[in-house]
Image: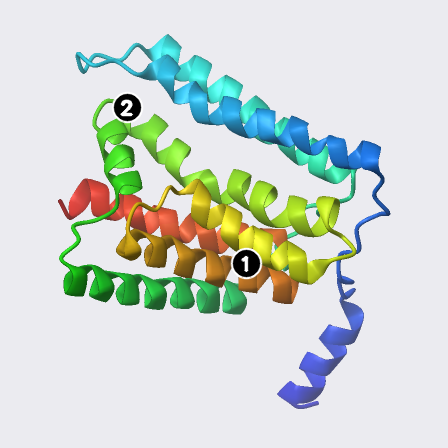
Amino acid sequence: MNYLEIAQKNAKQQPILSPHEPSHQTWKTRLTFIWALVLWQVSSALPAIAMNRQGHFELWKIGLFLLLFAACVWLSYIWARKYQLIPQINRRYFQLGKIAGGFGLMFAVGMISALIMALTGTNGTENQEIIDTIGKVLPPLVFVIMTTSAGFFEELIFRVSLFELLFTKWPKLATVLAWALFTAAHSPTDFASFMTYGLMSLVLTGLYAKYRNFYLNMSVHFLWNALGMISFFFLR
């Protein structure tokens, strides 16, 4: 038996994950979107617990942050699973080839954004400056968790909720709104920052519209933010 025959045999033996199909949504279930927004905002405010402008950080505050933050993540996941917005986590949803391709697209639009900034004489975005300022007064662990977790919360809010909860019958409308709201949420203040976040949103929204895979989007978003963390700690 050659390699091709062995691979085909193994493929037949492994169950194929069917595309995720969310349940029928009603106006009552759509109202639960408010709960997701609350959890997102609470998680965003939690780093203030561990913030200390004098540069001294107490371990119990960091521990409290980690506990409450984990609770927000868990409650958000339970909410999404309860209303069948995402499938149960499974390693086979983390498709390495697609994740690498998505990250490659993010890197490409990042280069385009850098070129636009160079041509327009723009030095970064105001949103990034705010993040960098916060990073200087937070414990590194808290800052890393806060930043990289955007791949979880923002994908639930701007992609999953719009496609699978609010506008299930209007995928084209969900696509446009997902792109626009994600871009607006990052507060672009000029052409360069608009293009920066608009292109990022285009890639992430396009990935979700094509594959409807929350775990794929979350992974690509996480890797992109992790690259930003490497830049913040080691390249500045």
* Residue 33 in the image: above or below residue 166: above
User: Regarding mark 2 in the picture, which secondary structure is present there?
Assistant: loop
* Residue 40 in the image: above or below residue 5: above
Quadrant assignment for the N terminus: bottom right
Percent across and percent down for residue 43 are 49, 25
Residue at 45 percent across and 66 percent down: it is: 100
Residue under label 1, please give it.
Answer: 205
Please say whether residue 87 is visible from this viewpoint: no
Query: What numbered label is drawn on residue 108?
Result: none
Residue at 73 percent across and 50 percent down: it is: 167
Percent across and percent down for residue 30 are 76, 37
Percent across and percent down for residue 215 are 59, 52
The answer to whether residue 36 is left or right of residue 204 is right
* Residue 69 in the image: above or below residue 164: above
Q: Nearer the viewer, residue 99 or 159?
A: 159
N-term mark: 1 or 2: 2
Residue under label 2, please give it.
Answer: 139
Which residue in the rendered view is the most extreme toward the bottom? 2
Q: Nearer the viewer, residue 185 or 40?
A: 185
Residue 51 quadrant: top left
Residue at 58 percent across and 58 percent down: it is: 176
The answer to whether residue 49 is left or right of residue 77 is left
User: Regarding mark 1 in the picture, which secondary structure is present there?
Assistant: helix
Residue type, label 2: Pro
Quadrant assignment for the C terminus: top left
Please say whether residue 112 is visible from this viewpoint: yes
